[in-house]
Amino acid sequence: MGADVSNNETLFARAQRSTPGGVNSPVRAFRSVGGTPRFITHAEGPWFWDADGKRYIDYIGSWGPAIVGHAHPEVISAVQQAAARGLSFGAPTEGEILMAEEICKLVPSIEQVRLVSSGTEAAMSALRLARGATGRDLVIKFEGCYHGHADSMLVKAGSGLLTFGNPTSSGVPEDFTKHTMVLDFNNSEQLEEVFKNLGDKIAAVIVEPVAGNMNLLPATPEFLRTMRQLCSQKGALLLFDEVMSGFRVALGGAQSLYGIEPDMTVLGKVIGGGLPVAAFGGRADLMKHLAPLGPVYQAGTLSGNPVAVAAGMTTLKIIQRPGFYESLTAQTTKLVEGLSKAAGEAGVSFCAHAVGGMFGIYFAAQVPVDYAQMMACDKERFNAFFHAMLDQGVYFAPSAFEAGFVSSAHDDATIDATVSAARLAFSKL
Ligand code: KE4
């Protein structure tokens, strides 16, 4: 290996020989920002290190799970103790009961919950349950919201208000998306129009109440209130996908911030603390339709895995400590205010927004309020900023259309170092 070829480059070249794109999830490949993905060797607190031994302040946090910081000693200890008792049994354990009870305690709209292994699996299962419980086929989602990669969710808006979705991925037959309609996020009038025409055919509306997959874009309270009312009026089920916002924007998730109770909630990320745990839950009268009680089938070899549940439960205990969210929110706010100030001093058109421990950065004059405004943000400038920060050891999400995540390990010194790096990065734009 030549002196100027980094280990990241060597590993990336090798990875591409055995794995499509060299990654096990597309966003990791840096195709949106360009350059060579960093192969991470280890992580601790707010940092992780790449294959060249370079340390980064990490604002991905595994896309949300690392809310208490990487390799938290209590989480690691719980995982080690659980692993020593066996990795997986394919039979029920007391730990799953404790996790289910904790989720029901923290998210009051959830009366019963089923654990699975990924957000995709949780959202897919919740949608199947909604269709099974209502006997209806039509599901509504919103452009820019992501609910995992189940076939019926890989869909873009149809041509008109009454046309159904078209696949966004090859390999998904049109038949698989014809019962999915894609509407505009934060557009209440359009939603009312669709409910007027099709309301009694709608099984469910699924939404990220605080969207994080088109960058950070919170729903307006009015949009969610309208959604709740329309679903209740027409017998459709309201599904909040809180895989990202759950336990991230507040202890009770986005639903606790808006004061709106969905019929079902999809969870993931934080509840696994970095290991594969996700969940879907809601009203007990709905959950009873699930096998083995009812006719809606859903299953999983590693669902409720004891080692993963140990990581998740320990994380859920830590985030319930007094002051956790006040501090997390204060640090995230300090970050976005510091970045905005640095950009202003450099005369760069930039803004930033935070909700709890989640943030968005936008190369635009004002924080976008809908998908069209989000897509109008200056992607090229983001990419230049991303690399200017990466060179200085600060790792933001490798896409202009992803959110960022702060952990309780991101202390003042870490945030100040980030803002200081940003001052230089903005001056180079
Ligand atoms: P997973 O299947 O990736 O565990 O969860 C899918 C999912 C469902 N719902 C929401 C709101 C989500 O944010 C996600 C996954 N989020 C992405 C971040 N953009 C995961 C990162 C990735 O795809 O590698």
Image (cartoon, rainbow, N blue to C red):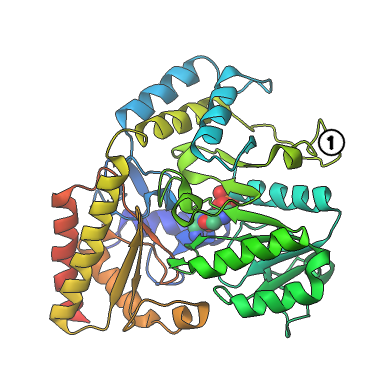
Judged from the image, the quadrant occupied by ligand 1 is bottom right
Tell which of 133 and 273 is nearer to you: 133
Q: Position of residue 167 (x, y in %)?
A: 72, 71
Q: In the image, is residue 404 above or below residue 281?
A: below
Q: Is residue 185 above or below residue 123?
A: below
The residue at the point 66 percent across, 47 percent down is: 121
The residue shown at (82%, 42%) is 296
Front-most of residues 361 and 27:
361
Quadrant of the image occupied by residue 172: bottom right
Residue at horizontal 66 percent and vertical 66 percent from the top: 141
Q: Position of residue 387 (x, y in %)?
A: 29, 70
Tell me if residue 142 can be seen.
yes
- Determine whether 125 is above or below 276 in the image: below
Q: Amino acid at mark 1?
A: Gly
Give the labeled residue for mark 1. Answer: 294
Question: In this picture, is 145 found above or below 262?
Answer: below
Residue 364, horizontal then vertical, whole percent: 34, 82
Percent from the top left, x then y, of residue 72? 32, 33
Q: Residue furthest top?
A: 85
Q: Is residue 164 visible?
A: no
174 sits to left or right of 153: right
Name the quarter where the C terminus is drawn.
bottom left
